Image (tube, rainbow, N blue to C red):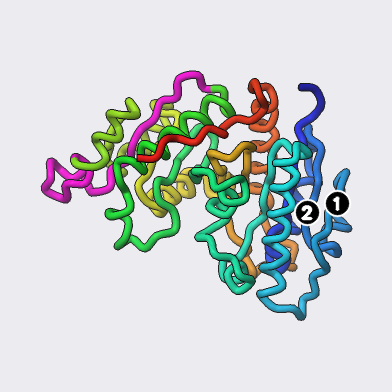
Amino acid sequence: MTGRPRLAVTLGDPRGIGPEVVAKALAGHPLEAEIALIGADNQIAPISAARRIGVGVWRRDEGEVSAGRIAVSAVEQAVRLALGGEADAIVTGPVHKHALHLAGFRHPGLTEFLGHLAGDRDVAMMLAAGTLRVVLVTTHLPLRDVARAVTTERVVRTGRITEAALRDWWGIARPRLALCALNPHAGESGLFGDEDDRVLRPAAETLVAAGPLPADTVFVRALRGEFDAVLTPYHDVGMTAVKVAAFGKGVNVTLGLPFPRTAPDHGTALDIAGRGVADPSSMRAALELAVELAGRARSTPGHRPGVSRPERG
């Protein structure tokens, strides 16, 4: 397939810093991609891009419901472009979950919503910062619910999705996975919990992955290049590792979709929106990674990487 990768880029919540960081990120060194911007009509107009798709006018006197509707509509439009073959990857600006839910959104986050829009696919959330790639087995759950939610089958399913993405989108022929432990010291032979031996170890064996390895060492080893990705049992242990390693430069990637999706690793920052001080580094990193992944995905036979549905346990 010839030509430059095509990106569908949403501005996110119109009240937040999304429009600003997108504009700043695109104003820098030119991207080797064709860009379609999607957002509130009056916010995309000033941003330089080859194509603009409006999803309604945003007025500052409108409330969270309107903001949520615009953000959701933009994501839906981006997915339509990708599924229709008009975009090779999508990049989503930061959204505000409370606004989304006031607007009728009933998914834990955009990761799950994207899986639904793409045909109810099994998806996984990756945080990438350079060579450090962390994949979350569970996402937005209270900590008290994590141990029950982390099953051997769920870990294996997440690992298979990760392997497929690393092969198809990153070009890693034989991905090396590590599994982060749930308990301190990987349970210390059951002294601090039996989940690591009872649940995680069988998953690691099935995936031929290292671990489960204690959280206080596995990310250091990954940063040294021992692993291509680390599977983590819950949200904060994975997110913290990436943000400490590369705050402001990490990228959120949705795995398992029939197209790459990236996003910056920060939120809407409503407190600084409109002041012109937002840092576009993470959005720029998300755009650049989307170009890279889309280019590689386009060269994959069938041009639909990540579409296989791992068997459910």
Q: Which residue is mark 1?
A: 52
- Report crowding for label 2: few under 14, some 14 to 19, many 20 or more residues within 10 A (C-alpha): many
Q: Position of residue 207 (x, y in %)?
A: 34, 29
Q: Position of residue 61 (x, y in %)?
A: 76, 80
Do labels 2 and 1 touch, CB within 8 Å?
A: yes
Location of the C terminus by quadrant is top left
What is the CA distance from the residue labelled 2 to the residue labelled 1? 6 Å
Residue nearer the viewer, 288 or 154:
154
Question: In the image, is 309 to the left or to the right of 20?
Answer: left
Badge 1 amino acid: Arg
Badge 2 amino acid: Ile
Q: Which mark is residue 38?
A: 2
Q: Residue at x 83, y 53 (%)?
A: 53
Q: Is residue 25 above or below residue 175?
A: below
- Report crowding for label 1: few under 14, some 14 to 19, many 20 or more residues within 10 A (C-alpha): some
> Which of pointers 2 and 1 lies earlier in the amino acid sequence?
2
Q: Is residue 107 magenta?
A: no
Question: In the image, is 291 to the left or to the right of 250?
Answer: right
Mark 2: secondary structure: strand
Where does the magenta region start and end? 172-197
Q: Residue at x 53, y 53 (%)?
A: 112
